[in-house]
Amino acid sequence: MNCQEFEQRAWAEPNCDEPEFVRHMNECPDCGPAAAELRAFDGEIGASLRVDCPEGLAARIRARQALQDADEAAPESGLVTRLRDWLFGNPGWVGAYAAAATVLLVVGVLRGGIEGATPELMPLDQLVAEHTLEEQFAMKVDMPVPRGDIEAMFGQFGARLVADLDGVTFANGCVMENGVKGVHLVVDTPQGKVTVLVIPHRTVDGTRTLRFADYQGRMSPYGKGTLAVVGGDSRALEPVEQRFRQAVQWL
């Protein structure tokens, strides 16, 4: 299957599980990441059209229950903001997504989700839990990420790579909340895959642990923001955290 055939099939059936489709997605450095985001986007469209059950609600409930968050305020998921940022950050795909983006915007209006006043920030542990649960598709992507891509992502936040980060199978610049971008990576370890989130606009006071769903995590200060590592096996968390501290230098 070549790239043109893959793209046609991806638009028609983004969740296709045929062996040739899956093989091309895992092996092609151009089609793989685009298809992964298309799958996630397709899921967000379906969830968003169910107005009675807003997108991200299940993840939000699980995160709140697992974290035992006593605060009853439930900040909006920022789907419309993240979608707008993703679209204009990837001009090659804008035309194909335009109609779907319009639908999502209309749904946002129906929910009263268009931002007027500045949204309040959600608790940091909830942000980590919610982002991890909403983007679990990233754990299924299995393709080595070039060092240059990782360097470019950290360079946006005033940091540079001073050592290799082996085992990175997913890397993306994600909107964390309120239009602020961060870094979302997945690292393969002997204990399983670990999600790494760099949240540049929020800082945590010392190292904190968290638990939600089937995951365990650590949050700690990182540059002017926060580094969060999340995985199914706690033994993998601190080694991954130390690798990122040694490999990334904040300027």
Image: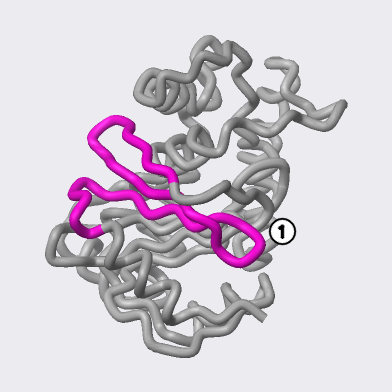
Relative to residue 30, is residue 123 drawn left or right? Answer: right
Q: Which residue is more in the foreground, 91 or 163?
A: 163
Residue 245 in which image quadrant: bottom left
Q: Does residue 239 appear anywhere in the picture? A: yes
Q: Does residue 95 appear anywhere in the picture? A: no
Q: Which residue is more in the foreground, 134 or 43?
A: 134
Quadrant of the image containing the N terminus: bottom left
Label 1, residues with CA under 10 Å away: few <14, some 14-19, many ≥20: few
Residue 212 colored magenta? Answer: yes
Q: Residue at 54% of width from left, 26% of height from top? A: 48
Q: Amino acid at mark 1?
A: Phe
Percent x, y for residue 42? 46, 41
Relative to residue 96, is residue 53 drawn left or right? Answer: left
Percent x, y for residue 133? 38, 38
Q: Which contiguous range is marked in magenta?
A: 208-236
Q: Main secondary structure of the magenta part?
A: strand
Q: Is residue 107 above or below residue 143?
A: above
Percent x, y for residue 162? 48, 89
Q: Which residue is mark 1?
A: 88
Residue 82 in which image quadrant: top right
Q: Residue furthest right?
A: 117
Q: Residue at 55% of width from left, 38% of height from top? A: 124
Residue 10 in which image quadrant: bottom left
